[in-house]
Amino acid sequence: MLHGFKTAANAIGGTLFLALFGVFLVQIGARFGFNQPLPWTDEAAVVLYIWVILWAAAFMVPEREHVVFDLVWNSMGRRTRQVMLIVGNLMIGGLALVGLPATWDYVHFMAREGTPVLEMPMMWVYLPFVLLMVALVVRSTWAIWQAVRGESLETELRNLS
């Protein structure tokens, strides 16, 4: 089931990126090829860019590929790393969980506003931010569960050797 979710998330992310690239090509062609800039392409590119970045951060990029500052982490022992994993994920997941209702309220509130050209409700523009917050809560919960069981540390030690 997890593999199917990952495949679907990657397919959606890839489709969003292809749409962004397509809009970008239309924009370049209209502006420089026909000297007729299309206002909707600027707006569509911005909306798709927001979706691509937030979708990828929420569902596509694995945690091990995020940029980290790990000088302190690498100098600590196994037990300390386990505590650091739990505390760090409690902070990230906890803050995302606490902020989730306010985030949803604001995004839902933005439904009354529309984008200038396409008149797309702003709720749909920023909806992937809510998805990112939910993904942070789920990822953090899973990471805490793995850290408590010691699984994430075992995987890390195998990957280092």
Image (cartoon, rainbow, N blue to C red):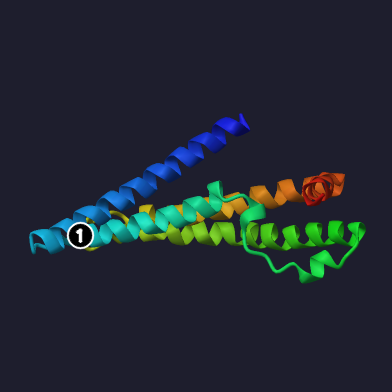
Q: In the rendered structure, which amino acid carries the disc numbered 1?
A: Ile
> Mark 1 sits on what residue?
28
Q: Is residue 4 above or below residue 122?
A: above
Q: Where does residue 110 sit, x and y in percent of width and height?
A: 37, 60
User: Is residue 140 left or right of 16 when viewed as pictured?
Assistant: right
- Quarter location, residue 158: top right
Q: Is residue 57 left or right of residue 94?
A: left
Instruction: Return the residue nearer the eye: 20 or 124.
Output: 20
* Count of numbered badges drawn on the protein: 1
Image location (x, y in percent) of residue 160:
79, 52
Q: Residue at x 85, y 48 (%)?
A: 148
Place of residue 18 in the rendered image (x, y in percent of width and height, measured from the top left) = 34, 46
Residue 108 visible in this rendered orientation of the protein: no
Q: Residue visible at 22% across and 57% down?
A: 41
Assign a secondary structure to mark 1: helix
Q: Residue at x 55, y 47 (%)?
A: 59
| Closer-to-camera residue (102/91) | 91
Within 10 angstroms of label 1, few (less than 14), some, or many (20 or more) residues? some
Q: Does residue 30 appear anywhere in the picture?
A: yes
Residue 145: percent from left, percent from top = 79, 46
Q: Is residue 53 left or right of residue 24?
A: right
